[in-house]
Amino acid sequence: MADDDFTAALGTVIRPGDPDWDVARRFHSGIGEPALIARASSTDDVRAAVGFAAAEGLPVMVRGGGHSAWGTVPGGLTLDLSALADVSVDGTRVRVGGGAQWGAVARTLAAHGLGISSGDTASVGVGGLTLGGGIGLMVRAWGLACDQLVGVQLVTADARIVEATDETEPELMWALRGGGGNFGVVTRFDFEAHPLEGVVAVELGVEGDPRAVIRAMRDVMARAPRELTLTYMDVPPMDPSAPAGASISGVWAGADEARAREALASLLAAPGVVERSLGARPYPEVLLEAPEFDPESPMPGFVGGNTLLRELDDDAVEHLASFREANPASILFLRSLGGAFADVAQDASAFPGRDATWFAMAAAFDMPGVLSEEARRRALSEWNAIEALGSGVYGNFTTSTDPGWATRMYPAVTMARLGAVKRRWDPANVFSRNHNVLPA
C-alpha cells in the first residue's frame, strides 16, 4: 500500500510537522517520536494501518490508555485505538473496545451490578493491562484481568480479522492471557463479568517499623477469604502518585462491611496499624486517578523491579524493608495473591508464577543528586537478591524497554511455547514494541 493510499484508506494519519503533531505524540506517560501516528476509528482502519506498517517494515506500537513506556521508543507506527472504546453488556458477557480505559468500563458495569477485576487506575487501558495479565484490586476474588477474558477480535500481522475463543483458537487465547501484544491488535475484548453490588474499601495507616505490620498483614491473608485483597505501599514525598509514607489499602469484593471487618480483625488490632476508613463504596470510586505526564517534571528512572513471591517469609520481609530504608527516595509495593489467581493452572495461561502468594515491587528513584553510582550499584544488587526469591516477573509493572526483559518474565518452557504462537501469527515480528517474544 502506497503512503497516499494508506492516508486515504485510514483517514487520520499524523506525521512530524503536521499542525497537531505535538498534541498527537503526547500520551499519558510521556512524549513519543514515532515515524507517524494512525488514529483508528474502526477495525478496517486498524487493518489498513497494520497492512501499511507491515509493507513498510515499520514496527507497530498500539496505544490504548497510554501508560506504556514503549511509546517513548523512537520510530515505528503508533496505532491510537482511543476511539475504539465502546462497552456493551449482555447478561454477564461484556464486550469492550480495544482502546477503552478501565474507569469507563467500571462505570458502565456498575450500572448493571457487575464488575471485572481490573487494575488500580481509571485511565489505564483495557488492552495493555489484560494482555499483560492484570493484577487488579480483586485478583484474589476473580483472578487476573486476563482470567476473565473469553474471546477477542484480533487484527493479525497480515491484516486479517480473527474472532478467537478457547474453542476456535485455544493456543492463541493461551498466549493472549499474559503474553502481551505480540500476536496482533485486539480491537475487541470479550469478558465474563461478575455480579457486584459494590466493594468495601479499606485504608490503614502504618506507624513505626513496618516489618511487624507486613508480617501481620501476611498472616491475615494466609487465612483470609478470597473476597479480600490487600495492598501495602510506602512512597517518599517526591512521588506524586500516592500520599507519602506507608499505608495498607484493601478491597473486599462485595458490600458486606461486617465480613470485611471480621476478616481484618487481627490486622486492625496489630501494633502500628491505624484505621483511617472502612466502608462500602461503588467499585469505580476506588480506582485511582494517575497524574498525566508533565514535561516540566518528568518521572525519573528506577533501579529495582518486581517479582512474584511464592512466600512472603521473614527473609523476604527483611529484604524488602531494608531496601526501602537503605534508599530514602524509593517505593515499596506489595499485593496479596492466591485465591482465584492460584486456581488457574500454570500451563493454562502464559502468565508466570501462579504459585506466588504475593506480588512485590521495590525501586529506587534514579535521578541526578539523589542516587550516586555507588548507590545505584548497591540498589541493583539488593534488588537482584529480592527478585531471586520470586517465581516470575510482571511485565505491566516495569518501565523498562530493554528488549531482553521478556526472558526475565517467562520460564523457558513458556517462552518456547509463546515463540511458536508468535511464529504462526506474526512471523515477521511486526508487533515488536512490547516485551517482545521472537518467532521461534
Image: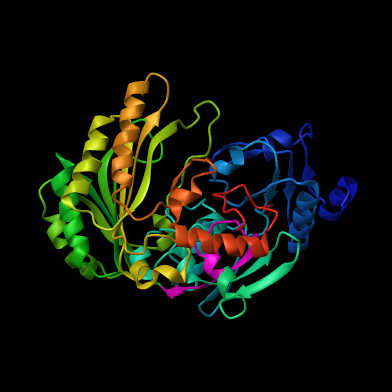
Left or right, 225 with respect to 178, comes to: left
Q: Residue at x 28, y 29 (%)?
A: 328
Q: Is residue 60 left or right of residue 28?
A: right
In this rendering, the answer to whether 12 lies above or below 417 is: above
Picture residue at 57% right of the left edge, 46% below the top: 66
Question: Dividing the picture into quarters, in which one does residue 336 lie?
Answer: bottom left
Q: Residue 294 colored magenta? A: no
Looking at the image, the residue that sits furthest to the top is: 369
Q: Nearer the viewer, residue 213 or 254?
A: 213
Would you say 128 lies left or right of 261 here? right
Q: Is residue 142 above or below residue 381?
A: below
Q: Nearer the viewer, residue 122 or 308?
A: 308
Residue 248 locus on image (x, y percent): 26, 50
Q: Is residue 186 visible?
A: no
**Residue 331: x percent and y percent?**
33, 38
- State the quadrant of the C terminus: bottom right
Report x, y in % for residue 128. Answer: 54, 55
272 displayed left or right of 167: left
Find the magenta span and give its range. Answer: 173-195
Please say which color scheme the image uses: rainbow
